[in-house]
């Protein structure tokens, strides 16, 4: 039985990698590595190490909302991708956890 990992990267909307949004650069690198997929989620509200609350509410609109990039793949593929992520993410949080994949046509194609 294969072990699946979920890589979760918490960054800010304003974070950049070579003048491009970091979240987009991470997605492109994941695609280049032929990972099963990546999802970018823009938060409604959140805060990070500076403890400043950022929100999408109209009266307190932040231009730098939290972003979460999630990638699920087999353990080996994630392990090979992690050094790239660590190079690209300078300020943010990178989490890794084991997940149970019940069904995914994208992942089934990579087995």
Image: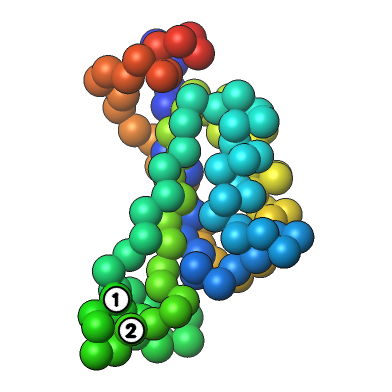
Q: Which residue is mark 1?
A: 56
Q: Is residue 41 above or below residue 11?
A: above
Residue that sits furthest to the front in the current view: 58
Q: Residue at x 59, y 32 (%)?
A: 31
Question: Which image quadrant: the N terminus?
Answer: top left
Q: Which residue is mark 2?
A: 61
Residue that sits furthest to the right in the current view: 18
Image position, residue 47 (x, y; %): 37, 78
Q: Residue at x 65, y 29 (%)?
A: 33
Which one is in front, 69 or 2? 69
Which one is in front, 96 or 18? 18
Q: Residue at x 49, y 54 (%)?
A: 9
Q: Is residue 62 above or below residue 83?
A: below
Can the viewer see residue 89?
no
Image position, residue 74 (x, y; %): 49, 24
Badge 1 or badge 2: first in the primary sequence: 1
Q: CA distance from mark 1 to mark 2?
A: 5 Å
Indicate which disc residue 89 carries: none
Q: Is residue 47 above or below residue 9?
A: below
Q: Is residue 106 left or right of residue 25?
A: left
User: Dot 2: within a 10 Å radius of its alpha carbon, few (fewer than 14), some, or many (20 or more) residues?
Assistant: few
């Amino acid at each position: 039985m294969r072990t699946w990992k979920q890589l979760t990267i918490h960054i800010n909307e304003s974070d950049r990698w070579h003048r491009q949004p970091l979240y987009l650069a991470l997605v492109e690198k994941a695609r280049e590595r032929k990972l099963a997929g990546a999802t970018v989620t823009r938060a409604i509200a959140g805060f990070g190490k500076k403890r400043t609350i950022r929100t999408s509410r109209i009266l307190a609109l932040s231009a730098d909302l939290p972003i979460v990039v999630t990638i699920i793949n087999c353990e080996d593929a994630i392990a090979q991708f992690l050094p790239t992520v660590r190079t690209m993410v300078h300020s943010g949080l990178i989490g890794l956890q084991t997940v149970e994949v019940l069904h995914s046509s994208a992942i089934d194609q990579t087995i």
